[in-house]
Amino acid sequence: MTAVARPPGGAVPGPVRSSRRGRLNLTRVERRNLRTGLLFISPWLVGFLAFNLYPAIASLYYSFTNFKILQEPRWVGPDNYTALINDPLFWKSLGNTLYLTIIGVPLAVVVALGIALLLNRKGIRGIGIFRTIFYLPVVIPGVAAAILWIFLLSPINGLVNQSLRVAGIAGPGWFYDPAWAKNGIILMTIWAAGDVVIIYLGALQGVSRALYEAAEVDGAGAWVKLRHVTIPMISPAILFNLVTGAIAAFQSFTQAFVISAGVGRGNDGSIGGVQNSLLFYGLNLYNNGFRYFQMGYASALAWILLIIILIATLVLLRASRNRVYYESAQ
Amino acid sequence: MSAIAAPRAGAPRSQRRLWSSRLSRVAPMVLLIVLAVVYLTPFVWMISTSLKTIAQSIASPPVLIPDPIVFKPFTDALTKMNYPLAFRNTLIYAVPAVIGTVVSCSLVAYGFALVQWRGRNAMFLIVLATMMLPSQVTLIPLYVIYAKLGWINTYLPLLVPTFLGSPFFIFLLRQFFMGMPKELIDAARLDGASELRILATIVAPLSAPALITVGILTFIDKWNDFYGPLIYLQKPELQPLSLAVQVFQTQHGTDWPLLMAASILVAAPLVALYFVAQRKFIEGITLTGLKG
């Protein structure tokens, strides 16, 4: 590689001919490398142009048209976007998704951190077995997990409510009760947060012993060490889990689809759970695109989703700017 | 625990401290065991239910050990949801996808990591940017294209993109390739080896662990994929396990032993893979975390 890189000053060592510049002001070696590089990345380049760039632009165009797949798209200006603002189902799905993002994601992130902290203690025996157990729910296919939880949370015969009854608590209707359906999904999310636990464990193992020893010398107890050493040191992992959790919540589909198909569909075959309590953003988009074939409207929903995800990511990153510690930046 | 109690025996004050230190050691372990039991219970219940009669599956109070143990739910699930066909369909989808992803991502990652060319870094930023693009944004135009090509109800919409690289795995392999011994690669170049040959004979064997991780993660991803088959594979005889079991569920509403058996049959191959290659799974997830 070093033979190829141009040293500062511009003089190119090696064969004299390679210093002759062609088009784009490149030497022969540079031209050959450019060709080789582009050749190697060409699968991605084709994929990017054909499966990312073109479709993204096309969906932006569709979002300003009335498009029902069988007919050619017809330009309608911003009609889809105004229709969207006046569509109660859009707001319903946005509200449901925000509930999942604001309550479910932080809850899962905190529980996973708790498990990771317990696992990271010195001298815990059988850590491998525990790690296996906590990660196992992640391995289960989403459809199978959803079917399992419909059963576990069924209002009368489900294991959860039967156990609550033993404790003298009348369990809620879960997926059959609009007020509780989303909490059922949150429960599933917490159960399947094993990958978050593993990411925390990786981060926790990177925290230097010396920092804890220094804190102990200053007389810090367990809580102070957690609050002022552990959490600041693993804050990048916490931020990562929050951001990816929020993005996943906005794109979540399979669980809610399977569950709402299980508890009954709408008259038109649309999905969204009892009183649309499980109509998340992705489900609403699917209903519009692939149930009603409102491709223009669904494209507008997709672009609003992109904008929401970008804003949410920026807000999270900005809010955490002073709270996240990056070792290399110091 | 006795090892902890050994020193400092005798003095009454240290006796109390000893107890509190014992408690602070035992309590987290107890909490961990309780949590582990809670996390395992759904699995235990799934297996137990799959061996019960329908009546016993909804008995109150719940019965943990099936009596009698019946295997009918499994034999029924195997035939009624045409498990062998759905299993074959899943492999038809997942295996070529693994090959496509590993091959295309290694090529692209090599181009970004080990060939020096102008504009490389700018181009790589585009790769990273596409990771932010939600799949829903491209979904509808892609559906339109595939419909025009006559690809609906074929595996092509699911497979062709896997041969064109996946941003995250390109990123992952590029990181790995950048750690390759440069002297070795330069020596091979001086000997006149082509870049493709260097990738195949030096870089790929040295990065086998990373390539296997990419392969396993892709396999899980495709095995579990629900959205793609839901949209592109409407014909029942084409449906992979993930979709077949969901259709099955809508047909057999509350036959819980049957549904639990079907779910176990869908999950079991992945769980088996997990137990065989556990380290790879964990590595993969840790690598995912590193991108943050």
Image: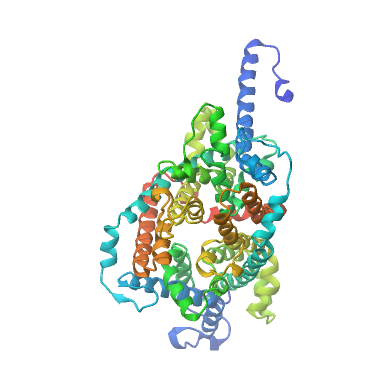
Q: How is the image coloured?
A: rainbow
Q: Whole-percent x and y of residue B205?
A: 70, 68
**Would residue A98 be found to the left or right of residue B166 on screen?**
left
Q: Quadrant of residue B197?
A: bottom right
A118 above or below B5? below
Question: In screen coordinates, is B280 left or right of B170?
Answer: right
Instruction: Look at 56% across and 54% down and name the residue there.
Output: A142
User: Is residue A67 visible to us here?
Assistant: yes
User: Residue B153, how many percent across, how many down?
Assistant: 54, 73
Which sits in the foreground, A80 or A316? A80
- Name which quarter of the figure residue B61 lies in: top right
Q: Residue at x 64, y 62 (%)?
A: B210
Question: Of all residues shown, which one is farthest toward the top?
Answer: B12
Horizontal and vertical percent position of residue A44: 52, 74
Q: Is residue A211 visible?
A: no
Q: Quadrant of the N terminus of chain A?
A: bottom right
Out of A310 and B4, give the one closest to the viewer.
A310
Q: Quadrant of residue A265?
A: bottom left
Residue toward you, B2 or A206: B2
Q: Which residue is more in the foreground, B155 or A220?
A: B155
Q: Position of residue A217 (x, y in %)?
A: 54, 28
The number of callouts visible is: 0
Placement of B282 over or under A17, stated as above or below: above
